[in-house]
Image (spheres, rainbow, N blue to C red):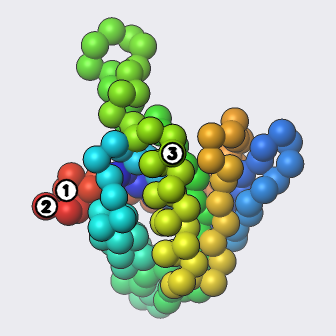
Amino acid sequence: MRFLIQRVNEANVSVDENVIGRIGRGLLVFIGISGNDNTEIADKMVKKLLGLRIFEDENGKTNLDLKAVDGQLLLISQFTLYADCRKGNRPSFTDAGAPDLANELYRYIIECCRREIAVVEEGSFGAEMKVSLINDGPFTIFLDSEDICR
């Protein structure tokens, strides 16, 4: 499982020119799911995501997590995080999870986050989406379950 996390001042996602999810200050998270992922891995990744202290405190130090700043989440499924570009110029996506598994785990991650965070918005699984954001920092972090779940 892979999370590409961007700290944002605001972000939104649209399908067919209709905004389906919008947040203010918080985290935009692109979620890639592999064929080897499961709910145990998802639990560890969500715990790490929600515990990241990447928001500034009163002294300007990154000491606060999402909940401490009353931050919001926008979660977007993105199988392209599993692009394999080692051979040729056309990426392979064979490491990405099958759509049924990926959607099930994506829904699971959303529900886990909703138990902890007041505002959790989402994209539309499998849809052609347009994502807009104002990156805060910029501050971008990549989490890979291969590293997190060792």
Residue 110 visible in this rendered orientation of the protein: yes
Compared to 79, does 4 lie above or below?
A: below
Question: Quarter of the image holding residue 28?
Answer: bottom right
Q: Position of residue 85 (x, y in %)?
A: 33, 22
Choose between 56 and 143: the one closer to the eye. Answer: 143
Residue 76, which numbered label? Answer: none
Choose between 10 and 47: the one closer to the eye. Answer: 47
Is 143 left, or right, of 137 in this rendering? left
Disc on the earlier residue, 2 or 3: 3
Q: Which kind of residue does numbered mark 1 sit on?
A: Asp
- State if disc 2 and disc 1 touch (CB < 8 Å): yes
C-alpha span from label 2 to label 3: 26 Å
Point out the image quarter for the C terminus.
bottom left
Numbered disc 1: secondary structure = helix
Mark 2 or mark 3, whichever is nearer to me: 3
Instruction: Identify the residue under disc 1.
Output: 147
At x 82% / y 53%, what residue is drawn? 19
Instruction: Identify the residue under disc 3.
Output: 100
Q: Which kind of residue does numbered mark 3 sit on?
A: Asp
Residue 150, which numbered label? Answer: 2
At x 33% / y 58%, what residue is drawn? 38
Is 44 left, or right, of 55 in this rendering? left
Q: Position of residue 20 (x, y in %)?
A: 78, 56
Mark 3 or mark 1, whichever is nearer to me: 3
